[in-house]
Image: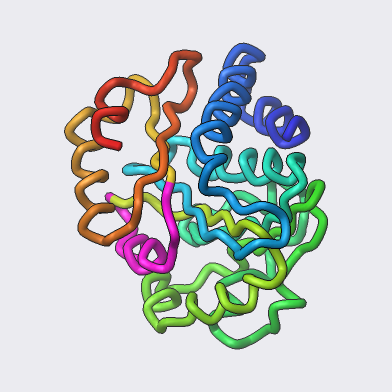
Amino acid sequence: MKSIVENTRKKSGMSGRKAQSMREELRHLWTRLQSILPSPGESSLRLGFVSTYPGEGTTTMAANFALFLGEQGLGVCLVECNLRRPALADHFDIPATPGISDLLSGSVKLKEALRPSVGAGVSLLPAGSVPRDVYGVFGRGGMGHVHERLAGLSDVRILDIPPLASAPEAGTILRELDGVVLVVRSHQTRQESVEKSVATLSELGVPLLGAVLNRITYDLPSIVERLL
C-alpha cells in the first residue's frame, strides 16, 4: 500500500496529511467490508470502485485498496475498466498494452494481458489499447467470460470503473459485480449527485457496500451513511 500512496503523492503533489487521510480511509473501508470479504481460497468476490464524476479519486482508491488487501494475505486482481482515462500502467510503471480492451477484442490471451506481482499478492489487468468505441468493447457481453477466467486466479477482483455520469458502459460493467464502493470527492460532489448515484446503483441491482469520502480526514458524511 505504501508504495502507490507515496507514488500518487509525489506525482500529484498530495501532502503528507492527505496521504495519511487516504490510508485512514482504506483502513475504515477494510473494517467495513471484512464481513463480506472471502478468506484465502474461498469463492472470489467481484468488487467495484466507482464515482459520479471524473477526478474523484476512484483509480487511486481502487489501486491502494487492492494493495492493502494483498498485504492482508488475499490474492487480488486489479482490473482497469476506465478506458477513457487509463492511469494504472503509469502508476505501476508497466507497459500500457496489452490489457482488458485487447482481451475483450480477442486480439490477445489472458496470460498476455495480465501483469502478475505488481504488489504483494496483486496482479493487474490494465486498460490496454484505447478503442474508438469504448461502450462497444464492454457491450459485447465479454466481461462475464473475463470474470470466469479470473475467478480461479484471485480471492478478490477489484474493478476500477468509469464515472457513472459520463460513461454509459459503467452500467454494463457494474451488473457483473457482487458489490460496489462509491468514491465521493470532498467539497466537490453535491449531495443530490450522491443521491442520484445511489439510486442508479439500486436500479442496476448492484449492492452498495460502502463509501469513501476522498481527500479529507473526516469520517463518512451523514448523507452517505443514511443512504447505505
Q: State the image quarter where residue 175 is shown.
A: bottom left
In which quadrant will I find the C terminus? top left
Query: Taking 144 as reference, is 183 above or below it?
Result: above
Residue located at (33% from left, 21% from top): 221
Residue 100 horizontal/vertical position (percent): 59, 71
Residue 78 horizontal/vertical position (percent): 63, 56
In which quadrant will I find the N terminus? top right
Residue located at (77% from left, 34% from top): 3
Does 169 lie within the magenta span?
Answer: yes
Looking at the picture, tell me which residue is in the foreground, 117 or 189: 117
Does 178 lie within the magenta span?
Answer: yes
Answer with left or right where residue 26 lies relative to residue 116.
left
**Which residues, given as a range, are shown in magenta?**
165-180
Query: Taking 227 as reference, is 186 above or below it?
Result: above
Residue located at (38% from left, 61% from top): 174
Query: Taking 90 as reference, is 101 above or below it?
Result: below
Answer with left or right where residue 65 lies relative to residue 161.
right
Residue 55 horizontal/vertical position (percent): 43, 38
